[in-house]
Image (cartoon, helix red, strand yellow):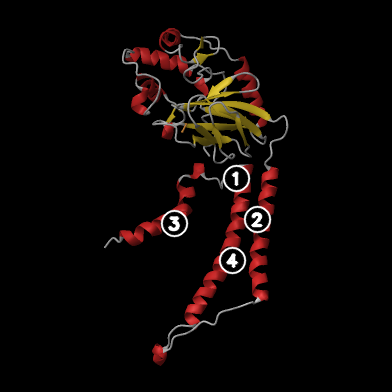
Amino acid sequence: MFKARVFCPAAGALLPFFTPALARSVTILDPSSFFGLEVRRLFLIVLVLASLIVVVVYGALVWSVYRYRTQGENLQVEYQASPLRGNERLEVIWTVIPLLMVLFLFGVTVESLVSRVLPIGAYRVEVEAHQYFWNFTYPEGFHTSNELVIPVGQRVEVAGTAVDVLHAFWAPNLGPDVDLVPGQDNRTLLETRQPGRYLGECNQLCGPGHARMLFRVIALTEAEYARFAKAAQAFRPVVATPLARRGETLFQQNCAACHRVEGVSQGTVGPDLTLFGLRTTLGAGFLPNNRANLKAWVRDAPALKPGARMPPFPSLTPQDLEALAVYLEGLKPEDLDFNGLPER
Ligand code: CUA
């Protein structure tokens, strides 16, 4: 018979051991980032200390149960523990050992915290959280949305605010999370040792679209990053085909009021779409960016993401959607593509 009373707590207790394997992309113990290494180091130190305590305490418990168990003919005998009074040596031992442990944990934690400090003049990207997307502004003046591009091996400061309600910016593999609060300027740092696409998420319940308010951090080698930043800074949309031109017209009519595209429109209600063609995901990181998903998203965003602020566009014909998709996919510099990067 299925014993739920036994099975559920057992499964619950085992869950933490399997979660990193199942959801590999969101384990803070991931050694691909400096932050992950530091967290893992502290975690292992605490685990070893805690295990020692468990062995001593449970050892004493099991030993006493065995040593003072009721035996055979002595069923009527009741053991009376003799109370301990004024044993100074014992009192010193059980005060000093925990004190040393706490001081040691304090020391290694401070060491970790100090090593995580942001250097002065760190590369600083501004983040702006909205229901339900992210805009990023780079020191060179260009923007991306929902995908933050950073160089490998550098501490990058991510600083910013929220425009509507409380959100939190969290890339579990790359750095500590930070609450983004309307009217406040908060900051965190990201750093990684390996190029790749890392998962990030909003870490504060911010409305019905919260679960689909994800993002990606694209980590590039220093050389690749320099190439990206240069291309992004110089980028202006080029409309090459009649279909794309039709898409641009439709964009001006339907999208420009809310979305910004460098040199084309200035909307600020929705994500900045200037480099949309570089995006590997859609709808704040919850759908792969391909043409079918893009058309479905434009046609009816709230159907795909509860609470999405973008209205449905039932008046757009399939040909209109195709033209818009072609135009949006073309919003990228030549020779840049992040789809080949390993997912981490
Ligand atoms: Cu934004 Cu949750």
Q: How packed is label 3: few (under 14 Cα within 10 Å), some, or many (20 or more)? A: few
Q: CA distance from mark 4 to mark 3?
A: 21 Å
Q: From the viewer's perspective, is 106 left or right of 63? A: right
Q: CA distance from mark 2 to mark 3?
A: 26 Å
Dot 3: what SS? helix
Quadrant of the rendering where the N terminus is positioned: bottom left
Q: Position of residue 295 (x, y in %)?
A: 38, 20
Q: Earlier in the sequence, mark 2 or mark 3?
A: 3
Q: Earlier in the sequence, mark 4 or mark 3?
A: 3
Q: Residue at x 34, y 21 (%)?
A: 300
The residue identified by callout 3 is: 14
Q: Position of residue 11 (x, y in %)?
A: 39, 56
**Three-letter residue code for mark 2:** Leu
The residue identified by callout 1 is: 36
Q: How packed is label 4: few (under 14 Cα within 10 Å), some, or many (20 or more)? A: few
In the depicted structure, whether residue 237 falls above or below residue 173: above
Q: Answer whether labels 1 and 4 touch (C-beta < 8 Å).
A: no
Q: Earlier in the sequence, mark 4 or mark 2?
A: 4
Q: Residue at x 68, y 57 (%)?
A: 103
Q: Nearer the viewer, mark 1 or mark 4?
A: 4
Dot 2: what SS? helix
Q: CA distance from mark 1 to mark 4?
A: 24 Å
The residue identified by callout 2 is: 105
**Three-letter residue code for mark 1:** Gly
Q: CA distance from mark 4 to mark 2?
A: 14 Å
**Three-letter residue code for mark 3:** Leu
Single out the residue that lies furthest toward the left: 1
Q: Position of residue 268 (x, y in %)?
A: 50, 16
Q: Position of residue 66 (x, y in %)?
A: 48, 80
The residue identified by callout 4 is: 52
Q: Earlier in the sequence, mark 1 or mark 2?
A: 1
Q: Answer whether labels 3 and 1 touch (C-beta < 8 Å).
A: no
